[in-house]
Amino acid sequence: MKSFLEMAKGEILKILEKEKLLDKQVKVTTKVLTPKEAIGNPDRDDFPLLKGKERMIQAETLGAIGHAFSDHIGRLSGTIKSVLSLVPENNFHRAAQVGTINAICRALSLENKTIHCKDKEPGLCSKELILYLTERYPNVKKIIMIGLQPAMAEAISKKYELKILDLDRDNIGKKRFSTIIMDGEKDLDEVLKDDYDLALVTGSAVVNNSIDDIARRIPKGKILYFGVTISGVAALLKLPRYCPLSH
């Protein structure tokens, strides 16, 4: 079975071929943003970007920008076709392709929120999340967050029963927001055996190559992706996504 990234690349390549853009020498330049460039000056200092755990990859093509989180950085340039045809060997390659897909989707008006929010917006996003969940998922009481987003987790913990899974070794085993953060690899099966109503999954899972395994284990109606990274993939594959304050 094809991965989410492979399916998204297949969809965007068909669109580009139809628009006669594949063979044009359109350059894709991938830039690594500093934390300040990516997130500005938010109200709290525990976001992964500010801790240096992740960096933001910025892809530019067709006059548009697409962002993607990655823990593996680098630089890459080439035509759209060459970047998307690359066999991804690491998280940076996947982030470059995801960022490129996001930029293309923005350029072709398939998705208009492909740039990360900044300054006070990440905090506002977490407050809006509760309203969003109340309206869209009124019967939800138990939530699993896969990929710690501290502002969201704190807001969720005040209203819902929350469990958190993460891949960051510095987070695993620590108590945050009245729950012990569990290992996103080792503890995933065990946590999903428990009763839960909704899994809130970081879109960065499409870059770290865990999204397909996660999606196989969670019913479609119980999963909601969040964040800017998965913007283009979500638009192309019609996946539910929450990221209201991205640009």
Image (spheres, rainbow, N blue to C red):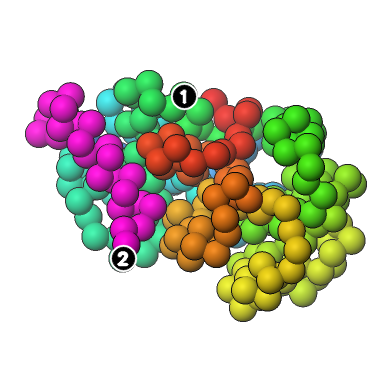
Tag 2 residue = 89
Q: Which of 153 and 58 is in front in this view?
A: 153
Residue 117, position as x, y percentages in the image: 61, 32
Using the rendered image of the protein, determine whether residue 25 is visible from the camera's viewpoint: no
- Tell me the SS state at disc 2: loop
- Please state if 233 lies on the left or on the right of 153 as rendered: left
Residue 102, position as x, y percentages in the image: 40, 36
Using the rendered image of the protein, determine whether residue 107 is visible from the camera's viewpoint: yes
Numbered tag placed on residue 67 in the rendering: none
Q: Is residue 57 above or below residue 111?
A: below
* Mark 2, other Cα within 10 Å: few <14 / some 14–19 / many ≥20: few
- Please state if 40 lies on the left or on the right of 197 as rendered: left
- Please state if 130 lies on the left or on the right of 31 as rendered: right
Q: Is residue 59 above or below residue 198?
A: above
* N-terminal label among 2 and 1: 2
**Residue lying furthest bottom:** 186
Specify the amino acid type for callout 2.
Answer: Glu
Residue 165, position as x, y percentages in the image: 68, 65
Q: Quadrant of residue 164?
A: bottom right
Tag 1 residue = 112
Q: Is residue 123 above or below residue 152?
A: above
Alpha carbon distance from label 2 to label 1: 29 Å
Q: Write the residue at 20% across / 31% down.
A: 16
Residue numbers of the magenta segment: 1-24
